[in-house]
Image: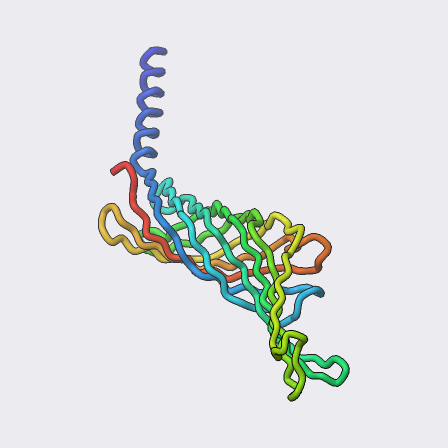
Amino acid sequence: MMQRWWFLVVCGALTCVSIAAAQVELSVGPAVGMNYNIHTGRDVATSTRGFGLVFGGRADLSLSQTLGFLTTVSFDNRIGKFSDTGSDGGIDFSRDVSLTVAYLSIEPLFKYTIPDRPVYFVTGPGIGFPVQGKSETTTTIVTPGYSFPSGYATQSANTAVENIYTRFEWKVGAGFTYKIDKKTIWNFHLLYSRGFTNVAKGLDWQLNSVTLVSSFEFTLGR
């Protein structure tokens, strides 16, 4: 009797594992997109906004019809720009500033798909390891008859942004899946990213983003 009981338990466990394995599906592929970045803080202008490029790879692991994980590893360029005007000794000038902070980002997101629908929702953390940071300022003298020592009315200067922090943020969004065929999937989703760290040491500078990413994924193991 005891042996029969153990036999039934083992058979039941193997059946559950087989069913779970049959439902698991992994698809991978390249991803590319664009983000709209909102820079805030006392050390940046309130109007600092800009678009940046996102590109990398994506792995989509479905554990069931509704639950899974969506992980993207990408190069993430967070650009912000603003313009202002000023005066120095009676000489008027305009200034265009571009801020660039680039990260190698990883976002392991929990994914919920509406049953029998191509729509899904995602949420989870994002971690960005700093790759590059710089500030580019273009100054133009607008008062007639004046120029810089170079003889031109416009000059540019580049400054590196030092001591950039590893970026931690939380992401939430929704997406759409279109199955091209049994092995090929087209995905895109829109995410809002809320940052929880300053961009760089010693600066009151925060960064939030809205990102649209599209990917072509190829199902493995089938």
In this rendering, is residue 89 above or below 134? below
In this rendering, is residue 186 above or below 141? above
Q: Quadrant of residue 85?
A: bottom right
Give whichever of 161, 38 is nearer the camera: 161
Which residue is painted at 32% across and 40% down in the image?
25
Give the number of callouts: 0
Which residue is painted at 35% across and 20% down in the image?
9
Where is residue 80 drawn, in percent x and y?
A: 57, 66
Q: Is residue 192 left or right of residue 219?
A: right
Q: Quadrant of residue 98?
A: bottom right
Where is residue 188 drawn, in percent x and y?
A: 38, 57
Image coloring type: rainbow
In this rendering, is residue 26 above or below 17? below
Give whichever of 36, 55 is nearer the camera: 55
Q: Is residue 33 left or right of residue 210?
A: left
The quarter in which the C terminus is drawn is top left
Where is residue 209 drawn, in percent x and y?
A: 54, 61
In this rendering, is residue 157 above or below 105? below
